[in-house]
Amino acid sequence: MARRVLPWLACIHVALFLAALAGFGAAGALDAAVVLAFAVGLAAAFVASAAVVVVVAVALRRIESSARRVATGELAQRVEGGGLVPELSAAFNELVAALGARLEGAAQERSRLEGVLNSSIDAVLAVDQEGTIAFANAAAAALFQKPHDELVGTAFGWVVPDEQAIAALRSSREDGKAQSLISERPNHQYFQVVTTPIAGGGEWAALAVFHDVSDVKRTEQVRRDFVANVSHELRTPLAAIKSLIETLEGGALEEPETARDFLARGNQEVDRLVRLVEELLELSKIESGDVPMARELVVLADVIDGAVDRLLPQARAQQVELSYEADDLPAVLGDPDLLERVLANLLLNALKFTPAGGSIRVRAVAQDGSVVVSVSDTGVGIAAEDVPRVFERFYKADRARGSGGTGLGLAIVKHMIEAHGGRVSVESEEGQGATFTFTIPIAPSS
């Protein structure tokens, strides 16, 4: 810069000198000493001006260099020393400091936003105007089973191959309309997909949020199944009772022996209805936690003895061998009446499906901080596809097996054991019998 300014400065001084000479010559008063003094002063002024120009040029060059570094991201860059342009240097430093503060604030805001989105249990995808993913949170990476770096930069349609979801996101991106839909993914996963436009979001044009509603869907299905099953279980005995009444009205009352037989059958159907309603109410109370449950030290050996003694006469009547063996068992914390009900339900279930000549064996051991109780039978067993569902309400693996039952006994067992902090399971092969096992934690004082 100094190289460009100094020639012009020299020209200005020469022009001034020549103008002065012309003035003196015209006045006829040219004096050599005066001319010399004037020339010396002019030269000094030239040198001083040149020095100032050089110093200012150096300062401006320093500011220019600092500005270029700031442009590359070196926000810590400052101009040291004011020189002859202190105001300009100070203003530059203030500008850079303000710019750094704003950029730092923007970075913090972005970091907070990403932190909030990553802490969400819902999967979140942000896309640009072309429908390419510009952001994906941690839940999205887990849902779509792809690393974050693979999701970003990929077309939304490749990650979410759902035509309705793609159309909804396009509508939000192009038309500025929010959309909501239910999308089904593999393994019976259901998601509520909400797409919204992003105003002023820079490269983010629209947002897609995936909220898992699989549990809600399953609950709805359970409710529908429950209503259907209750209707079926009620309809069967009611239809039988109605048929018996119509038969009696048709003249069977005139035949005392036939009438007594029909009344006995009707009484059985009424008992079945009463049992169904009672078990439904009991199951409902257990699930809602309304069943009063004692918390006392219980010796499971005594509970098992009581249940076995109650059902031993029935086992003998069916010609089924019922045996029990147990080690010295530590006490557990629970309700002895409810635990005996669990054992009775499991034994009744085994008796129902074990033919004459078969056997039922109850065994209890202490293992891994719990008392483990198993009820094994040599009955007809359970098909492999039915094993995972035997503890569901009203589920019956085989309608012939379930004749006379409500389909609630094992569901009650499951909820009673879970209320005691334990677990229940079943192992079975069709035609090879079944083994039902439950655990109860050992009492801390034992």
Image: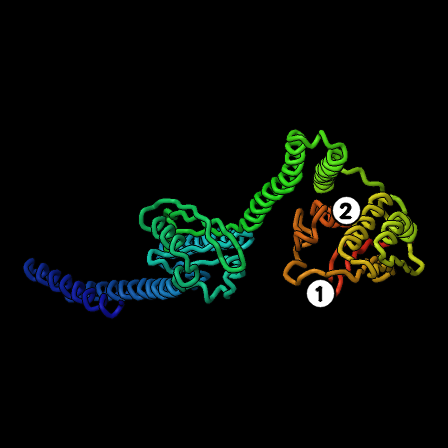
Q: Please, what secondary structure does the residue beneath circle 1 have?
A: loop
Left or right position of 314 against 129: right
Quarter occupied by residue 363: bottom right
- Residue 86 visible somewhere in the drawing: no
Left or right position of 286 against 197: right
Mark 1, other Cα within 10 Å: few <14 / some 14–19 / many ≥20? some
Question: In terms of depth relative to the viewer, which is nearer, 65 or 250?
Answer: 250
Instruction: Look at 71% across and 65% down and name the residue there.
Output: 429
Question: In terms of depth relative to the viewer, which is nearer, 96 or 433?
Answer: 433
Q: Which mark is residue 429?
A: 1
First in residue order: circle 2 vs circle 1: 2
Instruction: Look at 76% across and 60% down and name the residue there.
Output: 379
Query: From the image, which quarter does the C terminus lie in?
Result: bottom right
Using the image, determine if residue 128 lies above or below residue 5. Answer: above
Q: Please, what secondary structure does the residue beneath circle 2 have?
A: helix
Question: In terms of depth relative to the viewer, which is nearer, 187 or 96?
Answer: 187
* Picture coordinates of residue 219, whole percent (x, y): 59, 46
* Picture coordinates of residue 125, whole percent (x, y): 45, 55
Left or right position of 368 against 17: right
Number of labels in the image equals 2
Q: Which mark is residue 230?
A: none
- Find the distance from the CA under tag 2 to the CA under tag 1: 25 Å
Quarter occupied by residue 36: bottom left
Instruction: Look at 64% across and 34% down and name the residue there.
Output: 242
Frontmost of labels 2 and 1 is 1
For badge 1, the amino acid type reads Glu
For badge 2, the amino acid type reads Met
Residue extending furthest toward the right: 328
* Picture coordinates of residue 73, whole percent (x, y): 41, 63
- Return the residue at label 2: 416
